[in-house]
Image (tube, coloured by chain):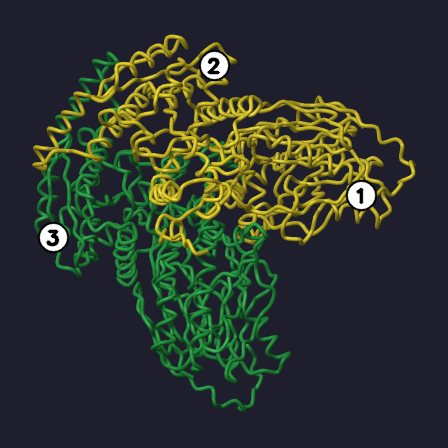
Chain colours: A yellow, B green
Amino acid sequence: MNIFIHQTDFTIADFTSVFNKIKNIFDNGAEGLHLLPELGLTGYPLQDLCLQKPFISAYLNLLNQINRYLEKQKDKNIIVFTGGLEYTLDINGVPLSIHNVIFELTATTPMKKIYTKRLLPNYDIFDEKKYFTSGSGPVLWNCHDTTIAVMICEDMWPTNTNQHIPTVEIAELAAKENKKIDLVVNLSASPFNVGKQENRVKRAKEISQYLQAPFVYVNRVGGEDEILFDGSSFVVKCDQVLLEGPKFKAATLEIQLDFSNKNESRHEKQRPQMKTDNTWESLYYPRIDLTNRPATLQLLSDNDCNEILEALKFGVREYAKKCNFSKFLVALSGGLDSSLVLAILKLSLEKDQSVQAIFMPGIFSSPVSYDLAYAQAKTLGVKIFSMPIKFLHSAIKNVYKDSFGRELAGLANENIQSRLRGTLLYAHANDIGAIPINTSNKSEIAVGYSTLYGDSVGAISMLGDLYKTEVVTLANYINRNFDNLIPEQIITRKPTAELRENQADEDNLPPYSRLDTILEAILSYHMDIKDMLQLGFEEHEIKKVFNLYINSEYKRQQFCPIIKVKPKSFGFGYRVPITKDGRFYTNYNHKE
Amino acid sequence: MNIFIHQTDFTIADFTSVFNKIKNIFDNGAEGLHLLPELGLTGYPLQDLCLQKPFISAYLNLLNQINRYLEKQKDKNIIVFTGGLEYTLDINGVPLSIHNVIFELTATTPMKKIYTKRLLPNYDIFDEKKYFTSGSGPVLWNCHDTTIAVMICEDMWPTNTNQHIPTVEIAELAAKENKKIDLVVNLSASPFNVGKQENRVKRAKEISQYLQAPFVYVNRVGGEDEILFDGSSFVVKCDQVLLEGPKFKAATLEIQLDFSNKNESRHEKQRPQMKTDNTWESLYYPRIDLTNRPATLQLLSDNDCNEILEALKFGVREYAKKCNFSKFLVALSGGLDSSLVLAILKLSLEKDQSVQAIFMPGIFSSPVSYDLAYAQAKTLGVKIFSMPIKFLHSAIKNVYKDSFGRELAGLANENIQSRLRGTLLYAHANDIGAIPINTSNKSEIAVGYSTLYGDSVGAISMLGDLYKTEVVTLANYINRNFDNLIPEQIITRKPTAELRENQADEDNLPPYSRLDTILEAILSYHMDIKDMLQLGFEEHEIKKVFNLYINSEYKRQQFCPIIKVKPKSFGFGYRVPITKDGRFYTNYNHKE
């Protein structure tokens, strides 16, 4: 059987492109089974869109349009499986239930639902139980004498509810109906994070071995705000990878699988045990090396860096494209974060895109910052403008003194510089029609080491899911692989916000290597003080980090979308109230 | 039986206050049944906190502390029902399941779980299926010869899943066990919205009649970011309200109910039918008067205005208190929104709190704006400072021209004024340690008629859930009831952003009365163009509003928390992706 994997990259609700794709498969496609991703008809994630009548009407129109088109087709041996939605509406058109399903399309019959997703992920960024109703049982679909076990995304993963494991129930169904499964198909819309593909392939191999059939995994491609879908569709047969699709790129893959040996004796091997552990912890794959004291964050490997780099390039490109921008703008400070953002933007540019930099020195900016920012812009061939804030800063201080009869000093005076930069960055972005890219990193965001409406501004954050030490690793990786795009001195100089005389980040914060590990322990491991003491950290530094973390929630709630490259990120899947009594984080009882 | 309703107002995770409350009930309370709200031991909503080990440890400590305390008590006829969490942890302390339960506390036995919440709300702001596992059946709890049917919050409401209706299943259980239900108890953490109390009481009466027993409703008090809990606990018996607690205020209510007539013949009346319609639509109670052409937004009644006013006062007070602020700051523009915010803040002030205003005229600000802002500040006795932005605005234009060789003009020049004001507002807020209150209204937020990091700044938004026409109604209500706190001319003058010569909001937007109705149709009714044409609107204005709405999603995602007073609000419960193909909103097919 010829199998075609279409890892499509349609924008959410771009029904025109979806229809053209289907039409194209029937008009020009080869005979065989054509597979599109989970919700291939609509895109994913839809969130509240799937409840809105204009969306529902347009989607139902698409289904009609497809059916009218199929009616006119001559008999052809083309079968399409695609993900889509099945609505049950009340008389006013309000959805009573929504199923996340697989439709079968053929040239001879109207489209037909063949399966409803059973495991609805509802953790982290996933809200599927908010919108969808789950299906009630496993399905073995027969087409052209081939028995196909169908799944949608989460159905392949372990569950901690112990209610049902779709894979196991598929095996039971096959046994009961005395069928041999020829093929397992999983249509997915699976968000990227670093290292995830390895887990997908590993799990698919387990299932392939368990069900004794090849496993075809189809994943969508796209960047939707903070969430990236990487494609990377693949086919495995037992422990062998037969095919693997590109990352972050639409593609059609083809493979021929032979199911002719129908009558081979189905010797009941001992099936491998299907794992069921899927706890909150195991979902987030914390990256701490627990063998060191103090424990340390696991270094990003070259492979990780490469994956992350591709993801970040794709993420900003997608966001810009879908918001109709072709120009990027970065505020270069002479520090590492903005420098890395500029280098990655430069690497990501497509033919019709461009990037500009703006350098806004204040009274505390060192001349070295100017030199480094300009040196990098020159190396990269990026246009850079300088707009000093010294004069405006002092003008504000004067007007402030006239108005309020007091000097602007301390934190207020630090913040005003940062906010002035934010304001000017946006003025220039508005003026030239560019999209300003945020340059904060995950360490800063976690401890609130940034100014709201100041250096925290931007349409989308490129590095907000990388700790500062990871920013360094990624910068070094880029310099090794792309001809020193970042001046070495930017990587090695002491991080500083330059908002007061001789300021250094690590005056206010623990050293980044310790800070980042504590943060990962808090965010991905949900550890408490006792756990972290055992990892070799000092009580005072743990408490300091907790206090900074607790008191900066309000800044995170107004942050821009952060391109997600880790299992646990700030953003849509991170939900913590601002108003709370945070004493429980730091009330450590030594007697325990 | 003596029943005590404790509508508590503890901050989330304030375990000290919770323990003291329990201790106080046993030390000083009268004999009888004492009721605390849903999750009375932890506060609500917890979101990710309930997954974090420091939270879990502190909570389990509280349970131990309560049990140790109860052990030492002498036998007393005091029973406490309180909401809390029941954790099942793996060996690493990671939650395998979390139940939202009712505990019974007595002086003689350790605390005991008696019920697990069955219906877990998972729409709008509710994410309970993300965190909790639901209980499996109804419970009739016996204490001192009294049969009590217990429920938690959502359990009393209709369900659209048709799986189970807890009230009906309670009746079935009572029939099966041949018990007479003496009392129905519902522990809630039910968010406020205007008109909700009426619905709660109505539903409670239905259930009381259905189960032929008095119904006691216990609700928590508190403001948690955008969500308010109003208390308003009550007792009904059939169609009679026996008791109603205060709104937005902690209180202990007492009532004596007589269950002595145990042997009255249980004549099986025809039970009223329990309604089961709980669609997405019915949850949001859209406020459109469909009898007019064009349809109009339902006017807020005096009663609505009073409820909303109390809610907004409470909301800002709670946010400030929980974030440790005692000063408020408002940027007065001479327009209605900021003027209303100031009036409400003034009305909300407690003894140790204060409010200041800052007026920041630009080159397009009319002298009338100055007069009106100062007149209001004088009437209210609020300190007001003027900090003109004219000079700074022109300084920025000069520096911009020097840096980029071009004039700052058009939208960039409009936005810069707004952002400069945002920057200066925060400078002053930082300087005096005040909390800046956002002054945007729901109409502006819906169509993006605001500048990101400009007039959209603030720690919390007071009016962000009220359309502009509702802002007018509320202002008039306040003037009628509180001695003209808002200069009449501010209410009647034409709304303008004053960012260019002779600008008026309605030059860029449809008239607010039409705009607001269209927005309510989009947001709460999820209507499409066809529906709105039938309501008497013009295709071009509907499309204009849709386009403004679609293209401003990115601004809403960086907005501050908005005090929620309506069933459908922007904020945590509103989830729409920025990147999407929005053509489906406006592709209207005339042939349909």
Q: Position of residue B429 (x, y in %)?
A: 20, 41
Find residue B485 and report its image quarter.
bottom left
Q: Which mark is residue A271?
A: 1
CB atoms at circles 2 and 1 under 8 Å apart?
no
Secondary structure beneath disc 3?
helix
CB atoms at circles 1 and 3 under 8 Å apart?
no
Q: Which mark is residue A534?
A: none
Secondary structure beneath disc 2?
helix
- Residue type at the position of mark 2: Asn
| Chain of residue at mark 2 | A
Q: Tell me if mark 2 has few (under 14), some (14-19) or many (20+) residues whose alpha carbon lies within 10 angstroms of its own.
A: some
Q: Tell me if mark 1 has few (under 14), some (14-19) or many (20+) residues whose alpha carbon lies within 10 angstroms of its own.
A: few
| Chain of residue at mark 1 | A
Q: Which residue is mark 3?
A: B380
Q: Are marks 2 and 1 on the same chain?
A: yes
Q: CA distance from mark 1 to mark 3?
A: 78 Å
Q: Which residue is mark 2?
A: A479
| Chain of residue at mark 3 | B
Q: Mark 1 or 3, which is nearer the eye?
A: 1
Q: Mark 2 or 3, which is nearer the eye?
A: 2
Rendered view: A277 above or below B425 = below
- N-term mark: 2 or 1: 1
